Amino acid sequence: MKIYVDYREKELIDLLREKLGKIEETNLRVGDIILTFDNHAVILERKSAYDFIESVRSNRLWEQLIKIVKTEEIFDKTVKRKILLLHGSIKELTFHEFDEKLWASLSGAFMEIVYVYGIPIFFVEDVQAVITFIRILIDREIRKANESLPKERWFRRRLSEIPEKDEKIYFLSSIPGIGNELARNLLRHFGSIDKIANASIDQLMMVDGIGSKKAEQIYNIFH
């Protein structure tokens, strides 16, 4: 895993080094922070509350976001996630008075970012919280927690409510010792549950993460 930070992000660079170790300063063509993993990358655009408001007013925000949206690969990695990270208090910038016009503009901007550009927004308190957010994001990306199914306790008794595309993953991941990741690997390799059920132990062992014991266990489930 590597962390690339735009060289203009002086406020973040020292903190990131202190908390997360080695980072690489560079001139990023898109985003402020790029996280790269074995098979994918994550782009983060970081803005303070003041910067966000000013970039909305000047329309600079939309130029930055369209670049992010169009970026499908960076540092030879496929971009899987694109995030807008905001920190600081908007209320403090308005001197604690409710500004109807400002909040109407910001509400429209939030909806445009999420629904039109398809980029999720996360709000944190300050720069220190930005570092914590990045640390947790890295951990979840490594564990593939950001692409897992909801915990079983939320839908164990309501299988009919699981989205159809997730039903096969749910079924396979319920086999002892087979979690969501191995379930995805099995489906990616065989293409269907029928083919998995008819596979031999040797064929099952050809799947990433499936050793002899798991292969035998899966085989015995279906035979």
Image (tube, rainbow, N blue to C red):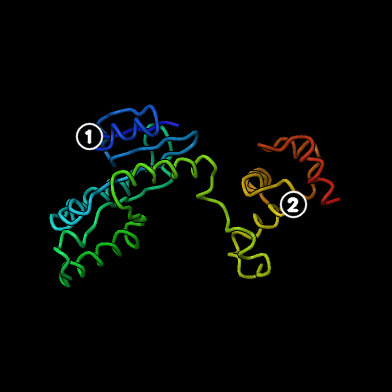
Determine whether, in the image, residue 145 is placed left or right of residue 50: right
Q: Is residue 45 left or right of residue 186?
A: left
Residue 122: horizontal and vertical position, in percent? 35, 54
- The amino acid type of the residue labelled 1 equals Lys
- The residue at which mark 1 appears reads as 10
Tag 2: amino acid: Ile
Judge depth for marks 1 and 2 and give the one in front: 1
Give the x, y percent position of residue 100: 17, 72
- The structure residue drawn at horizontal position 18% and vertical position 50%, both measured from the top left corner, is 51
Front residue of 194 and 99: 99
How far is disc 1 from disc 2 in space, using C-alphas? 49 Å
- The residue labelled by disc 2 is 175
Q: Residue at x 76, y 38 (%)?
A: 203
Query: What secondary structure is found at the residue carrying circle 2?
Result: loop
Residue 219's place in the image compared with 211, above or below, is below
Q: Is residue 54 left or right of residue 184?
A: left
Q: Residue placed at 26% from the left, 37% from the top?
A: 29
Q: How many other residues sit within 10 Å of disc 1, few (<14), some (14-19) or many (≥20)?
A: few
Please state which of residues 127 and 185 is positioned toward the viewer in this rendering.
127
